[in-house]
Amino acid sequence: MDLITIFIIAIALNMDTISISITKGFTIKNINTLQSLWFGIFFGFFQGFMPILGWVSGVELQHLVSKIAPWLAFILLVAIGLKMIYESIGNDKKGIASEGQFSFKELALLGIATSIDAFAIGVTFAFLNTPIVVPAIIIGLFSFIFSGTGIVIGKKMGQLFKDRFEIVGELF
C-alpha cells in the first residue's frame, strides 16, 4: 500500500478525533497545555495501537469484527453522550453553570470509542498482507496532531463565542 493511501486512511480515521477534540476544547474551561498533550497521547496511542491489534487478530476474526465493531462504537458513544446529558441536567438543577472537566477516565473511553474503526482497518491490512507498523505510526501521529489542533480550535471558538453556543443548545 502506498504512502498517499495510508495518509488518506489516517485522515479519515481521525475525523471523529478532531471533532471530539474541538468539542472538548470548547467545553473544558481553562484547558491547559498538559491536558491538551494528554488528549494527543491518548488518541494517538489508541488510534495507533488498534490497527496493530486488528492486524494481529487477522482474517480469522474479520467476519465477527465487521458485525460487532459498529455496535460497540455506537454503545460507547451513546453511553458517553447520556453521561454528558445527565451531568448537564444535574448541573441545571443545582443552578450551577455547566463547566466541563478534564477526566482521564472519559479520555480513555473516548480514545477506545474513536479507534474501533482503526481496529477494523488493521484487520483489513492483515487480509491484504500489508505490513502494519508504518501505517500504525502514521495513524497515531495524525491522531496526535488532529487532537491537538482540535483542542486549539475548540478553545478559540469558546473564547470567541463564549456562552452563545449554550444559548442555542438550550433552544433545541
Image (cartoon, rainbow, N blue to C red):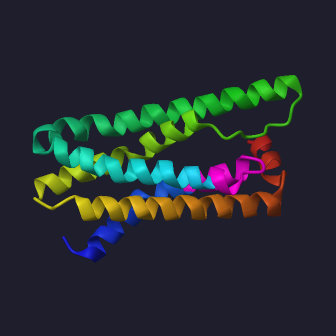
Q: Main secondary structure of the magenta part?
A: helix
Quarter of the image for residue 128 reads: bottom left
* Residue under the point 51% across and 33% down: 78
* Residue under the point 39% across and 52% down: 47
Number of numbered callouts drawn = 0
Q: Where does the N terminus fall, quadrant-wise?
A: bottom left
Is 89 on the left-hand or right-hand side of 39?
A: right
Q: Position of residue 69 (x, y in %)?
A: 31, 38
73 is higher (above) or lower (below) than 35: above
82 is higher (above) or lower (below) than 147: above
123 is higher (above) or lower (below) than 90: below
* Residue under the point 37% across and 33% down: 72
**Does the magenta run of residues contain 28?**
yes
**Does the rendering let one see residue 23?**
no
Q: Position of residue 17 (x, y in %)?
A: 50, 54
* Residue under the point 87% across and 31% down: 96
**Does the magenta run of residues contain 29?**
yes
Q: Position of residue 159 (x, y in %)?
A: 81, 60
Q: Position of residue 122 (x, y in %)?
A: 24, 51
Quarter of the image for residue 158 reads: bottom right
Q: Where does the C terminus fall, quadrant-wise?
A: top right
Is 113 on the left-hand or right-hand side of 66?
A: right
State the extent of the magenta-drawn residues as a range: 19-35
Front residue of 171 and 12: 12
Task: State the residue lying farthest toward the front.
Answer: 34
Is 44 on the left-hand or right-hand side of 104?
A: left
**Does the rendering let one see residue 143?**
yes
19 is higher (above) or lower (below) than 57: below
